[in-house]
Image (tube, rainbow, N blue to C red):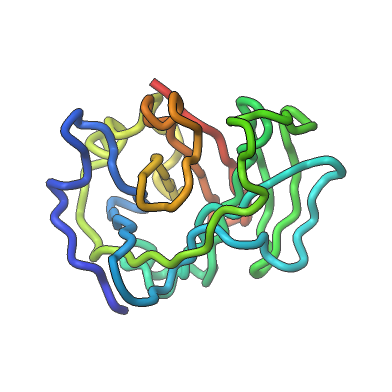
Amino acid sequence: MADIEFNLEDITDEHEDLAHPIVYWRGRLSVFVRPDEGEYAHRFGGELPSGATVPDKAILHALLDIDTTQCAALEGLSQTRLPLIFPFRHDGGRLVYHLNDNAFAVDELSPNEPDDDWPYEEFPDTLPLSTMGSSPAFEVDRDDVEELLWQGFYDVPDDKVVIVIPPREDYGVSLWGEMGDAEMVQCVFIFDPATGKVTAENQCS
């Protein structure tokens, strides 16, 4: 497992907002980083996984595909890849889907139809593809992690995986537009390893 060097003190920016994507499971946290050079195990953006079952008219985006075998905080997880899909084009959207190997099937999407100019005009159909590395696993108290989320964990049990992805300039794309990025709107995913269920929502300040 090739970890990326990371100082946990750099997890927040000068405003103490979460500055990097993170994954947290059973008391251990890893940080995702996009290095300047090289190819790494986790994929940001790109096409949806093959075999995806998506409702008519829905427009969904592949945000981050995690290779769990190369993520220290997810050591022991039976799911080898964790594709994180987000409903950016669905205003204030909530997405629930189930994983089956690397494919997924949507169980719930609200609102059902996308908005032409949400989150901003000319939002790309596919996010630019790049790779990310992940840091070693840090032992972190749950309360400290919860403080990094705008609305917390929603009483999510400890056996669920929590992934939080804030906007960053080095993704090569704005996730929320000028105003949303400035407000550091977070994409929050809850994954249940027992059922394969993933819930995706956003949190804002």
Residue 179, percent across and down?
44, 24
Task: Please state the total of marks drawn on the protein image.
Answer: 0
* Residue 126 on image: x %, y %: 63, 53
The one of 2 and 80 positioned closer to us in this rendering: 2
Q: Residue at x 36, y 44 (%)?
A: 168
Which corner quadrant of the image does residue 133 belong to? Answer: bottom left
From this view, report whether residue 125 is shown above or below residue 52.
above
- Residue depicted at x 20% and y 31%: 16
Q: Is residue 182 left or right of residue 78?
A: left
Instruction: State left or right for residue 113 relative to residue 67.
Output: right
Residue 100 x/y as whole percent: 69, 64
User: Is residue 170 at all visible to an observer of this figure?
Assistant: yes
Quadrant placement of the N terminus: bottom left
The answer to which image quadrant residue 204 occupies is: top left
Q: Residue at x 53, y 58 (%)?
A: 128
- In front: 151, or 127? 127
Residue 38, percent from left and from top: 33, 76
Of the 4 image quadrants, the one containing the C terminus is top left
